[in-house]
Structure formats: C-alpha cells, structure tokens
C-alpha cells in the first residue's frame, strides 16, 4: 500500500504528491523558459517519497539522535464539553495559556483547569490574550462557522497585483483539475511512478522575471529570495525554492524564539541574516535587500508587517516587480482573519482531528499522520511564487493552512479498513529516502528532496546555517 503513503482516512499521500508536483511543474516550466526549450521537461513524483517528505522533521537526526519534540505543555486537553489543543512550543505562548487558566506551568494543573472550562470559551479567551489554542470541532460545526465560508470562497493559491487589485486563482492551484474551490479532479499520479503535468496553462510564454537569466541546470539559479518565516509552512516554502536552486536568505529577528530541530530540518541550503525590523536601521536594511530581491516569503500574522510599513504595497513601492508570498493560519479576511494558528490547531478547528477520531474509534483527537497542512502550504506557496515569477512578477500570493485543509477535504476519503491499515513508516523503513551530511552540529540525517524534473539539478547546496 505504498501508493497510499501514510495511515489515514484522508488521502494524504495523493495530496502530498499533488502539491510536490505543483511546485515541480512550475519549476520545470521556468527551467524550460530560461534554457530555451520547446516544452517543459518531464516531472515525476512518487506518492511515497512525497508523503515521507511531509513528515521530514520526524526523521531528522543529529548524530543519530532525534532533534525535534513537542514542548511538555503542548497537546490535547479534555474540556468540560469536548477537547481543546494548546500550542505551547514557545515559552510566551505557554505563559499566556497558563495565565488565562490561572495555573502554574505544570501539566496536571493545566489539565484540571481545562476540564472546568468550555472548549469555545477557552479557545477565544486564549486567542484574545495573544495565545494560541483551538477547540476540536466536528466538520458540521466547522461548516457552520463563518470563517469556513471565507476560506471556501478563496482559491487555495490566490494571486493579486502586488500594489492591490482583484484576486484570482493561480494556475498551480488547479494542476490536473484539482481546484481550491469546488470539485476536485485527478492529480495524474499513480503509485510510486506517477507522472504529473509540467505545463502551467495561461502563464506559458510570459516574462519569467524582469531581468535576463542565463541558462542553468538549476531551475531557479540566480533568483533571490528573502525568507521571513518560522516553524514549518513558511520555511518549507523557502526550502523548496532553495531545492530548485534559488538563493534564499533567512531574515530573522534576534528577539523572536525559534525551534532548533525545525531550523535544522527546514533551512538547508539557505543563508542567514538577523534584522530587527522594528528599528530604523533594521527597517532600512530590509528595504535595501528588497530592492534586489525577486521573492519575499512571510508568515507573520496578517497585517503585522503592514503595521511596520512593510506590507505588500510598501514593498511594491520599492520593487514593483517583486513577488510577495504570505502564509497564514486562517487567511487575512473574515472573523478569524489574522488569528494566530499552527497546523495542529487548524486540524482541530476545521474538523479533521474529530473525523480522524471517529474513523479510528478512538476516545481522543486523532490528527493527520503528518503536518500535512504546513507542508502542503509550503509546497503550494513555492509553486505560486514560481508561477508569479513566470507571469512577470509584481504579484502577491496568498496561501492559508485552512485553505489547504479545504483542498485536502475535497479529495474525499479512503475506507478506514484500507486507509488506517497503511503501515506507519519508521526511520528504518525510509532509508532509501534519506541523505546524510556533516554540519556544524554533527552529522545530519534528513529526508532528501523529493521528485524529478528531467534534465534539471534539484536539491540543497549545503546544511542549514546556524546563528
């Protein structure tokens, strides 16, 4: 059952392969344009390799030891009327949750306090305090939520003119007939040897950038990317672009926390620069970088950078040909526009974890077997970024985790007897998909870049930077 990828009633293997194919198809078309080819080269993506790439942080090892784990207070808690998930991987989020609950940062105390609260009331109280939590909803409860209508009404990969204008659906969001809204068709993938489309519709023949690019075996060689993201979805988008040959520089605040294991997994092939964008010096230095950039990736809460004078319209004034890519939890519009969130929380809020629980006959939430929304958003954001370059730039690209979840939902379900019987691959089961390399922290074992573009060189130029 390798063609199913991972154990779930959701079609996560097929979905993973589609998103990887979407990015590779755009890279193939870009590769063809810069190298003067008559047509984009063949793209191949295996379901198994794509699914394993979607849980790359689980397989990361430093000198043979696992490097990523959840913080002690992060997890699912039983409330008075259901379940709530608290995200406490950052110390300030843990502090906010415990302050709202009125308890010390101790698991037993948190569990007892949550049991006395309603799931929706607690979800809102923590969000209003600046923390991050999500109540577990059924799919029916999510369907009745006003944010769901907003999410369902937008393309999974949305584009708009950088300086402002009408939103339209990116071609990479409908590869193989798969739409972010409405019906879902075939993704053109069969088992481990499936082949996806390499073209990209109306964008074919458009200017690929505002400057001349020399022929290269690396599809995105010479493309300059500024990556202002943390955790999984945004860094994965940057990692995908780096895997296609782009020059990616992480722009990190020296004041914001991060997670070491995720940094080691998701930032291969990137450079690192620290800037505090809230200072005049940091603000000016960033705008200098933007003048020479092709792509900016950001996953700050919607509106946060605009409040600093660094929103899409501000950057368009500096570089009108820029591609600006935003990744958020629930999107920028609607009652939850701007609400903080992470993959595991969006799975709870949108009914995914509850459906998994029912399908498995379990007594507690059952999430997807990977951070599918995070990884999917990263691959689709990268696909959108490349398509926007091929359209000549000057575009804003928007992807939300909830929108990615909506797209996954549209693929339908597997029979639980089939989907849940898929083996859960251990590290020893994926040895053929791993690579090992030295780094400043020791030998890294990590999942290799998935997929194949005929004639192109894919993969990362080196280990992640350490700061």
Image (spheres, rainbow, N blue to C red):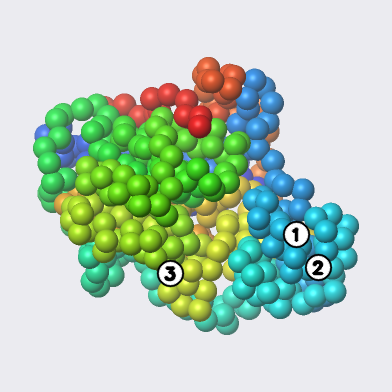
- Local packing at callout 2 (Cα closer than 10 Å; few below 14, some 14-19, many 20+) is few
Q: Position of residue 288 (x, y in %)?
A: 26, 45
Q: Position of residue 99 (x, y in %)?
A: 75, 65
- Residue under numbered circle 3: 332
Q: Position of residue 206 (x, y in %)?
A: 13, 51
Disc 2 or 1, which lies upstream in sequence? 1
The answer to which quarter of the image holds residue 85 is bottom right
**What secondary structure is marked by label 3?**
loop
Disc 1 or 3, which lies upstream in sequence? 1
Q: Position of residue 315 (x, y in %)?
A: 26, 57
- With 277 as the anchor, is 114 left or right in this view? right
- Residue under numbered circle 2: 102
- With 425 as the anchor, is 314 left or right in this view? left
- Residue under numbered circle 1: 76
Nearer the observer: mark 1 or 3; the answer is: 3
The answer to which quarter of the image holds residue 237 is top left
Residue 176 shows in this picture: no
Q: Residue at (53%, 55%) from the top-left corner?
A: 373
Q: Relative to 370, say whether 136 is above or below.
A: below
Q: Nearer the viewer, residue 291 or 198?
A: 291
Cα–Cα gap, marks 1 and 3 = 26 Å
Q: Residue at (24%, 69%) from the top-left corner?
A: 164
Residue 121 shows in this picture: yes
């Amino acid at each position: 059952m390798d063609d199913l990828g991972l154990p779930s009633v959701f079609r996560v293997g097929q979905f993973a392969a589609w998103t990887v194919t979407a990015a590779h198809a755009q890279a193939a078309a870009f590769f063809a344009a810069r190298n003067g080819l008559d047509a984009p080269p063949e793209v191949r993506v295996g379901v198994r390799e794509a699914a394993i790439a979607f849980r790359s942080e689980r397989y990361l090892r430093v000198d043979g030891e696992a490097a990523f784990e959840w913080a002690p207070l992060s997890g699912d808690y039983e409330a008075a009327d259901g379940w709530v998930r608290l995200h406490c991987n950052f110390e300030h989020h843990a502090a906010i949750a415990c302050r709202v609950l009125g308890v010390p940062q101790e698991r037993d105390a948190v569990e007892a306090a949550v049991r006395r609260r309603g799931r929706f009331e607690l979800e809102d109280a923590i969000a209003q305090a600046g923390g991050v939590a999500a109540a577990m909803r059924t799919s029916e409860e999510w369907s009745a939520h006003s944010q769901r209508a907003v999410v369902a009404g937008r393309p999974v990969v949305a584009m708009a003119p950088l300086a402002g204008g009408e939103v339209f659906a990116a071609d990479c969001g409908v590869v193989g007939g798969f739409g972010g809204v409405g019906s879902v068709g075939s993704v053109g993938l069969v088992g481990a040897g499936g082949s996806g489309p390499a073209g990209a519709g109306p964008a074919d023949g458009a200017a690929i950038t505002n400057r001349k690019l020399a022929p290269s075996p690396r599809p995105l060689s010479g493309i300059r990317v500024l990556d202002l993201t943390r955790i999984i979805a945004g860094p994965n988008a940057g990692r995908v672009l780096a895997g296609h040959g782009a020059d990616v520089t992480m722009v990190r605040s020296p004041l914001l926390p991060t997670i070491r294991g995720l940094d080691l997994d998701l930032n291969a092939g990137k450079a690192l620069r620290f800037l505090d964008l809230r200072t005049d010096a940091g603000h000016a230095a960033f705008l200098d970088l933007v003048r020479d950039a092709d792509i900016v990736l950001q996953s700050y809460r919607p509106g946060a950078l605009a409040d600093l004078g660094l929103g899409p319209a501000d950057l368009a004034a500096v570089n009108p040909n820029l591609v600006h890519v935003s990744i958020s939890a629930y999107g920028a519009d609607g009652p939850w526009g701007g609400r903080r969130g992470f993959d595991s929380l969006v799975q709870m809020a949108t009914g995914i974890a509850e459906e998994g629980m029912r399908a498995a006959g379990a007594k507690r939430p059952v999430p997807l077997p990977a951070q599918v929304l995070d990884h999917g958003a990263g691959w689709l954001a990268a696909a959108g970024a490349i398509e926007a370059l091929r359209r000549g730039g000057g575009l804003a690209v928007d992807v939300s985790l909830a929108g990615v979840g909506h797209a996954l939902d549209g693929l339908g379900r597997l029979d639980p007897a089939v989907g849940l019987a898929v083996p859960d691959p251990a590290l020893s089961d994926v040895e053929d998909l791993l690579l090992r390399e030295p780094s400043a922290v020791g030998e890294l074992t990590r999942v290799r870049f998935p997929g194949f573009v005929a004639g192109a060189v894919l993969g990362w130029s080196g280990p992640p930077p350490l700061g």
